[in-house]
């Protein structure tokens, strides 16, 4: 069974979302993928999420998603916590969660359910079914829907002690601060307790109720570095990152500044990466993955290929990405 206090600590940091590189024939380039993982680990990243959105989760086949999970656990080899992305229909999500457990991952991240009709109780039921299938793993719901209420998350937390964190990806910092406070305050019904400060990675035992306020869950800013400082003020203690594939030292520097409460240092790092992240966020994140893969291609680390519905960057944007990478001195 996973030590839930350990995985809580791992979520309070840079949660890397690796890209999935493709070979010339369109298959997964397993050698390049493993090399990219080693680069992250060698840089000091200690939490990785295979099958995240930057990994083109929705463009991979079921077999490819299982392969990515297996490659990640094998390459990480205990050097980091592995948080496997799972989702799609409920049967598929449960099967993927059990595969993650059997492969050796310590956590799963449950993607937002893909369905045109999502009720509050239906969302809770979906998340609970997946969490209950792997009671020994830490579970992190990926919350992108602004209609999901703090009360729904609180009910899930009360029902499932292994729901330890939340990847919050609604672009509204004020709403996030209130949501985190309300969800934590109302998530009652468990028997455990927590101590310590997840901002520095020190946590105690975790049960169904981990204190009050934001501390019941570890809050991850799910919109990456661009939103991390604002969400940090509202209770986030970690953030996801696609940029970390390219320049891990920048992502880790931002984390260090936020943990130290060094606002000028955090602002300086944020300004360096802002143009890159704004390219990724433009046009409803149409080029989110393409920008990261272009930067990796500039560095000779993988091909720039992405799968539809993503598309390669136009020449002008490619030049912008190359200039940013050169300016960082990666």
Image: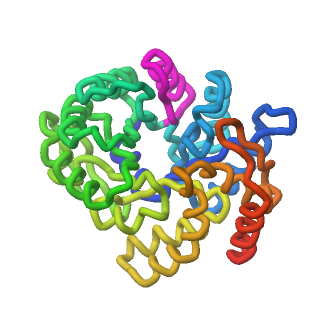
Say if 55 sits above or below 211 in the image. above
Tally of numbered discs: 0
User: In the image, what residue occupies the spot 54% across and 70% down?
Assistant: 274
User: In the image, what residue occupies the spot 77% across and 39% down?
Assistant: 22
> Taking the image as drawn, is residue 192 in sight?
no
Q: Percent x, y for residue 14? A: 49, 58
Q: Is the magenta stretch mostly helix, strand or loop?
A: helix
Tell which of 44 and 264 is nearer to you: 264
Q: Percent x, y for residue 104? A: 54, 32
Residue situated furthest bottom in the rendering: 264
Query: Which of the 4 quarters of the picture holds residue 122?
Result: top left
Query: Which of the 4 quarters of the picture holds residue 163?
Result: top left
Residue situated furthest right in the rendering: 24
Say if 231 sits above or below 25 in the image. below
- Left or right of 65 in this view: 260: left
Q: Percent x, y for residue 67? A: 67, 29
Q: Looking at the figure, which quarter contains the N terminus? A: top left
Q: Percent x, y for residue 113? A: 41, 29
Structure colour scheme: rainbow
- Per the image, is 103 magenta? yes
Tell which of 313 and 176 is nearer to you: 313
Q: Which region is colored magenta? A: 85-105
Q: Looking at the figure, which quarter contains the C terminus? A: bottom right
User: In the image, what residue occupies the spot 64% across and 65% down?
Assistant: 247
> Taking the image as drawn, is residue 287 in sight?
yes
- Left or right of 214 in this view: 51: right
- Per the image, is 184 magenta? no
User: In the image, what residue occupies the spot 41% across and 34% down?
Assistant: 112
Say if 92 sits above or below 244 in the image. above
């Amino acid at each position: 069974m996973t030590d839930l206090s350990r995985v809580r600590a791992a979520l309070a940091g840079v949660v890397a979302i690796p890209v999935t590189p493709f070979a010339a024939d369109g298959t997964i380039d397993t050698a390049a993928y493993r090399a990219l993982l080693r680069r992250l680990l060698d840089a000091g990243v200690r939490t990785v999420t295979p099958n995240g959105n930057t990994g083109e989760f929705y463009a991979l086949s079921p077999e490819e998603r299982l392969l990515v999970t297996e490659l990640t656990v094998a390459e990480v080899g205990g050097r980091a916590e592995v948080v496997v992305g799972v989702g799609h229909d409920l049967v598929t999500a449960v099967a993927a969660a059990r595969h993650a457990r059997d492969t050796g991952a310590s956590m799963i991240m449950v993607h937002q359910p893909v369905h045109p009709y999502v009720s509050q109780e239906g969302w809770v039921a979906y998340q609970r079914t997946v969490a209950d299938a792997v009671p020994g793993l830490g579970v992190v719901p990926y919350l992108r829907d602004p209609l999901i209420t703090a009360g729904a998350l609180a009910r899930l937390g009360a029902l499932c002690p292994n729901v330890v964190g939340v990847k919050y990806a609604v672009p509204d910092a004020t709403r996030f601060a209130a949501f985190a406070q309300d969800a934590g305050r109302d998530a009652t019904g468990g028997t455990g307790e927590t101590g310590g400060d997840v901002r520095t990675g020190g946590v105690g035992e975790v049960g169904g109720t981990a204190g009050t306020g934001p501390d019941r869950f570890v809050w991850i800013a799910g919109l990456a570095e661009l939103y991390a400082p604002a969400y940090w003020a509202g209770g986030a203690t970690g953030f996801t990152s696609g940029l970390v594939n390219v320049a891990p030292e920048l992502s880790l520097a931002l984390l260090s500044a936020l943990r130290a409460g060094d606002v000028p240092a955090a602002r300086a790092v944020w300004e360096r990466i802002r143009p890159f992240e704004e390219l990724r966020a433009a046009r409803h994140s149409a080029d989110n993955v393409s920008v990261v893969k272009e930067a990796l291609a500039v560095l000779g680390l993988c091909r720039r290929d992405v799968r539809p519905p993503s598309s390669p960057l136009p020449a002008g944007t490619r030049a912008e990405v190359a200039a940013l990478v050169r300016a960082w001195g990666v």
